Amino acid sequence: MGLTWKEAEEIALALAEKFPDTDPLAIRFTELHKWVTELEGFSDDPKASNEGILEAIQMAWLDEVRNR
């Protein structure tokens, strides 16, 4: 089974690996949404996200970057 919007930590890890030099706080939610839906293994409905979900992914990604 692929990644879904509910898996913020797993998505954050994948984003950190794919975009290692990117500041998560510098990404607009529209761009973040596009990047998430284009991740290998993402299988959820692209229309099922919202601002809260994208913010959770962004914060998890930020934590991942800071903990490296």
Image (cartoon, rainbow, N blue to C red):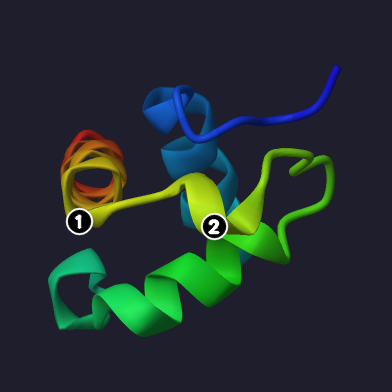
Q: Find disc 1 in the rendering and name its residue.
A: 51
Q: Is residue 19 visible?
A: no
Q: Label 1 is placed on what type of residue?
A: Glu
Say few, some or many: other residues with alpha carbon within 10 Å of mark 1 (under 14 / 14 to 19 / 20 or more).
few
Residue 50 relative to residue 15: left or right: left
Query: Which numbered dot is residue 68?
Result: none
SS at badge 2: helix
**Given the current orientation, which residue lies at the most extreme front position?**
47
Structural distance between the alpha carbons of marks 1 and 2:
12 Å
Residue 63 relative to residue 41: left or right: left
Query: Which numbered dot is residue 47?
Result: 2
Say few, some or many: other residues with alpha carbon within 10 Å of mark 2 (under 14 / 14 to 19 / 20 or more).
few
Q: Give coordinates of residue 25: x percent, y percent.
A: 13, 71
- Which quadrant of the figure has residue 64? top left
Q: Give coordinates of residue 14: x percent, y percent.
A: 59, 44
Residue shown at the point (31%, 43%) measured from the top left: 57
Q: Which residue is at the front of the view, 52 or 56?
A: 52
